Amino acid sequence: MKAYTIQHGKQQLTGIKVAEPQANEIVISLKAAGLNHRDLMMKGRIGNQPNVYTLGSDGAGIVEKVGANVSRFQAGDEVIINPSLNWYHNTAAPPSDFAIFDGSFAEKAVVSEEFLERKPSHLSWEEAGVFALSGLTGYRALITLGQIKAGETLFVPGVGGGVVSYIIQMAKAVGARVITASRDQKKLEQAEQLGFDRAVLTDDNWEELLADETIDLVIETIGGATFNRSLSVLKKGGRIVIFGSSTHDEISFNLRDFFYGHYQLFGSTMGSREELRELMAFSEKYNIKPLIDKTYSLTDIEQAFDYLSSQAQLGKVAITI
Ligand SMILES: NC(=O)c1ccc[n+]([C@@H]2O[C@H](COP(=O)([O-])OP(=O)(O)OC[C@H]3O[C@@H](n4cnc5c(N)ncnc54)[C@H](OP(=O)(O)O)[C@@H]3O)[C@@H](O)[C@H]2O)c1
């Protein structure tokens, strides 16, 4: 089968053999997959390893073959991959054996039945293919840790981000007021369909422009480039959740201002299977769908990597298989 792999430091579309499923595993014939920021970093992380490593954490497809002990699925079922492996319940942090699935940029994937869920019926194949990783990350940040409530105000900069496009929709479904930011005025105009209430440019003076707002929750994904500016618009006693740092990881901030401000800072990463199931029910109830910017075929996957690297995207990049 065709797969997009890394081996000996080389990233390429190549032909590999499909593994035989173990007793608890399922072979899926993939229909669509989702490109994530993480995929851009895997080449650097894997390095020169000799083993074939297939990229891609998000995917949706049809069950083709099941192992002898599989009980929840049968051939023909439509499924999505839960990329958040070994984290079953909504605990304060993931378990020590937490791992992220890789292997969806391929015609077939072999996945344990524990990490498959039924495809949400309101999503197309492409939407289902990009759904889980970003949706789950956004859900835990906004709902589980951010505890957003109706009537509260959320500030979430970086409207172009794949996760941010879910967070905005979910916060609006809960009844919150949502403010976002982008470096690109055109992106803000194109993103209006997400339903945010107010937007500023990333280069604007946020403290001055947002002085009339009472911001209860900030979700920060941009990192060093904006963290202190995001903190400066948060109300005293407010919450800030971080799960990414697209710019630099290390920052300095004023501890005295922080403790006098009674701010609460939460770190987050993806989420548990329990939260993924909550997210699926929530998305179905409020008809929340991923915002897909561009779709590429598996054959053109290198163009998809280039596009995401260019940061021109607004929402998710899908791969059809
Ligand atoms: N911990 C986890 O489980 C987890 C899961 C998913 C993602 N993440 C991380 O979270 C971050 C966001 O992920 P994503 O997939 O949503 O990202 P993405 O699609 O790559 O988008 C990031 C957005 O951040 C803004 N941005 C990037 N660089 C910037 C800069 N120098 N200055 C100002 N704004 C900048 C841009 O928004 P505009 O173009 O609108 O300005 C960009 O579209 C990434 O760092 C990713 O690795 C972590």
Image (tube, grey):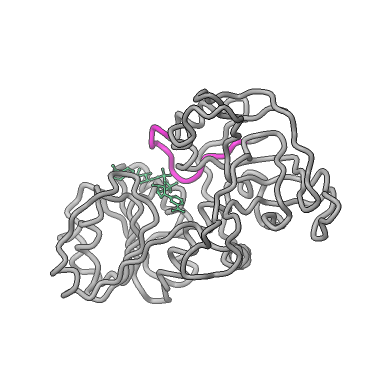
Looking at the picture, tell me which residue is in the foreground, 119 or 213: 119
Task: Please give left or right for residue 109 compared with residue 101 in the image.
Answer: right
Query: Is 305 above or below relative to 255?
Result: above
Residue 87 percent coordinates (x, y): 58, 61
In the image, which residues are magenta?
A: 309-319
The C terminus - image quarter: top right
* Residue positioned 21% across, 47% down in the render: 203
Total number of numbered discs in the rendering:
0
The N terminus - image quarter: top right
Magenta stretch: residue 314 in it? yes
Residue 176 percent coordinates (x, y): 40, 70
Task: Please give left or right for residue 160 compared with residue 3 in the image.
Answer: left
- Name which quarter of the figure residue 210 lies in: bottom left
Residue 182 percent coordinates (x, y): 31, 48
Looking at the picture, tell me which residue is in the foreground, 104 or 54: 54
Looking at the picture, tell me which residue is in the foreground, 102 or 302: 102
* Residue positioned 62% across, 62% down in the render: 280
Looking at the picture, tell me which residue is in the foreground, 241 or 47: 47
Magenta stretch: residue 93 in it? no
Residue 270 percent coordinates (x, y): 49, 57
Query: Is 42 above or below relative to 152?
Result: above
* Residue positioned 42% across, 69% down in the render: 145
- Name which quarter of the figure residue 33 lies in: top right
